[in-house]
Amino acid sequence: MTQKADIKWSELRFSYIECDYRFISVYKDGKWDEGELSQGHHISIHQGSTSIHYGQQCFEGMKAYTTKEGKIVLFRPDRNAARIRNSCENLLMAVYPEEKFIEAVKKVVKANERFVPPYGSGASLYIRPYMIGVGENVGVRPAPEYIFGIFVTPVGPYFKGGLTPCHFVTSKYDRAAPRGTGGIKVGGNYAASLLAHKEAVDAGFADCIYLDPATHTNIEEVGAANFFGITPDNTFITPKSPSILPSITKYSLMHIAENSLGMKVVEKEIPVSSLDQFSEAGACGTAAVITPVGSITHEGKKYAFYGEGNEVGPVTKKLYETLTSIQCGDLKGPDGWVVEI
């Protein structure tokens, strides 16, 4: 058995820790090379690269877990492979083959096995695949070359306190344009969120809630996560919009809600004025898994959820426990969800 790194796993935050190996593959002259594991934490690119000037880049977020039996597993890597392919196609970037994507993820996790947090620690190995446009260029056009890379780092909870309610405020800013890049995982969406996030935190909130960019009347995303609400009649409702990133975590929760908890599941527009229909609410994504939403403040009006916004609702807790139990191998999920390395 591989000896683990000397890390206080239970004290980890969501921050970068250097690991031993990364994976790098280069696209040049119309084809990908074989790719390789390498050491190092920096890359060197041409100053004319499109990723620097025109934002031609995208990325993914995944996690690896240790099961009770000591196995290392991935959660739905095929979905990440498909999503980064979609991002690349929308940005006119070279597509890294999906089967090679999964193979590369397995290689880099295996090579960094000592950094995969142990079972029961509450931590996981965060996996960051990325694609950037590189090479000599100055005009607004697709890059002549691309780098596909993967690095990993052990992480704890995205929000301090783990599964505890956080409080949010709606933002006057947009994270993406209507019919723009909101539905793909491109860095520009996150750059556009930095000021809104800072203003929300400065005002005493965990993060901001983005409304739809066309009308500013419907709930869209919670910071960098997807939103869901639970009604008193046991319905799971989540926003539907082309400018929302399709969260793998959210669609997994929708499946669990319907097939494990017997809930009705609905994707539809959620007017911010209708927030009082929810008894519970949450934000979900790879980084946070589920963050209970204690309250949302909109134009001075506060919508508080379960326990006056101070407690985790029972449905949210059950969704979280079911999903994380599947991810770490304690509970059997649908075929293909958990992939052993």
Image (tube, rainbow, N blue to C red):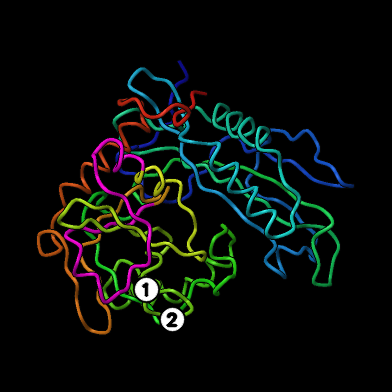
Which residue is most to the bottom? 299
Residue 288 point in image, percent of width and height: 36, 51
Residue receiving disc 1: 218
Q: Nearer the viewer, residue 17 or 159?
A: 159
Residue receiving disc 2: 215
Residue at left 32%, top 38%? Answer: 323
Q: Contact, CB < 8 Å: mark 1 with mark 2? A: yes
Residue at left 63%, top 51%? Answer: 86
Say whether residue 63 is left or right of residue 231.
Answer: right
Between the C-alphas of marks 1 and 2, the distance is: 7 Å
Residue 132 point in image, percent of width and height: 70, 55
Q: Residue 191, relative to residue 79: is it above or below?
A: below
Q: How would you rate the neighbour count of disc 2 (Cα within 10 Å): few for under 14, some for 14-19, many for 20 or more?
A: few
Q: Nearer the viewer, residue 94 or 229?
A: 229
**What amino acid is labelled 2 in the image?**
Thr
Q: State the image quarter where residue 211 is shown.
A: bottom left
Q: Label 2's element? A: loop
Residue at left 77%, top 51%? Answer: 146
Magenta stretch in the rendered image:
255-284
Q: Label 1's element? A: loop
Q: State the image quarter where residue 109 is shown.
A: top right
Q: Residue 196, relative to residue 148: is it above or below?
A: below
**What amino acid is labelled 1 in the image?**
Asn
Determine if the magenta segment contains residue 114. Answer: no
